[in-house]
Amino acid sequence: MVTTSGLFESIRGQLLLKRQSLASRLQATPPAKRALQLGPVSEPEARACLHDLDAAIAKASDGTLGICKVCHDYVNDRLLMMDYTACVCLDHYSLEERRYLEWELEQSQVVQRALLPQEVPDIAGLELAVFSRPAQIVSGDFFDFFQYRDGAYGVAIADVAGHGVPASLLMASVQTALRTLAPISACPSEIVQQLNRFFLRNVHFTTFVTLFLARFEPGNRLLTYVNAGHNPPLLVHGKPNGASYHWITPNAAAVGLAEEMEYRPGAVALERGDVLMLYTDGVTEAANVSGEQLGGERLIQTVMENSGLPAKELVIRLYRRTVDFAGSFALSDDATMIACRIA
């Protein structure tokens, strides 16, 4: 098939936006926050994506992008739009490989479709409560609940780099992808691996997303998770001899930041009375008129002081603390918090 110059120009424009967004985010993000988003990935590894984008932009400019290594014709347009590094026609793959790639094409289309409704599940032994407030009319924050193929429960919280309408549209894609992939997946790492591929290779995605994705098994209270560059959830253990806490730090880079990323799930056993607080940076980075941020220490203090309360009341207390701290100084970023309490 012949790929048109119009398609090359469209792909080149999207790749330039993608490169500009990633480069500006890496440069403008403060070092501490950038280290959080990258998790165990080094900054040079993340910047390697920029070199790949530069090579693809150059090929799109001279018309050599998407040339098949076997027949030297252009690969399918739909395949190239989903994966700008594609360099083998579908016809040259085995039947099994073609089926898998066709499935990926279908998933890529599903990822970009409409926003699905959110539902808070009724899970025996687990109290859930959510608060989410956009900085603008729409939000770049995201949260959802779903089930894996074996019936285990899933919870997700994410934050797209940026906010407003563009961020909200991208978050709609993330939610649709999770709802599509979870019923056919067994663990968070499988899903995040697939999401990262979509975000890195699809020319329509021009930024990155921090994501905490977990799997909860009510029978043994085991929480399996991938923290892809997201703010560390706070886990408070409500023990009779006094509460303790620890942060669930990132064990992977944010989705869309690193090409060679092996996602390995972490795990933590929860106990009766434990509280897991998930949140986006709009909570801890809420600032008062002096520019001082709420920060992690105040978050710890608020959650530990109220860890014995029902999840709904805990969320209300944290929200009030955030608003009282910011005062009349408007919250400048989307803010979302999820309280998970083992009843």
Image: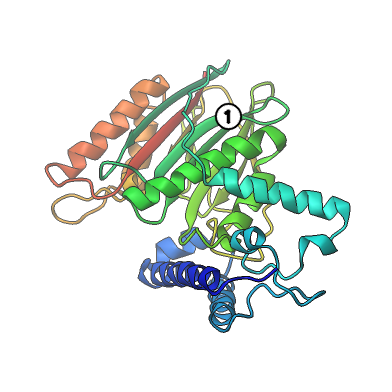
Q: Quadrant of residue 84?
A: bottom right
Residue 211: x %, y % from top left: 51, 48
- Helix, strand or loop at label 1? It is strand
Q: Nearer the viewer, residue 151 or 307?
A: 151
Residue 213 visible: no
Residue 333 locus on image (x, y percent): 29, 49
Vertical placement of residue 279 versus 36, above or below? above
Could you tell whether 1 is left or right of 243 in the image?
right
Give left or right: position of 72 versus 228: right
Q: Nearer the viewer, residue 165 or 194?
A: 165
Q: Residue at x 25, y 39 (%)?
A: 322
The colour scheme is rainbow
Q: Quadrant of residue 142?
A: top left
- Left or right, 253 with reference to 93: left
Q: Residues within 10 Å of mark 1 (few under 14, many from 20)?
A: many
Residue holding disc 1: 146
**Which residue corresponds to the image point at 22% horizontal and 54% vertical from the top-left?**
292
Residue type at the position of mark 1: Phe
Q: Quadrant of the N terminus?
A: bottom right
Say which residue appears at 52% left-offset and 46% top-offset.
Answer: 112
| Residue toward you, 2 or 304 | 2
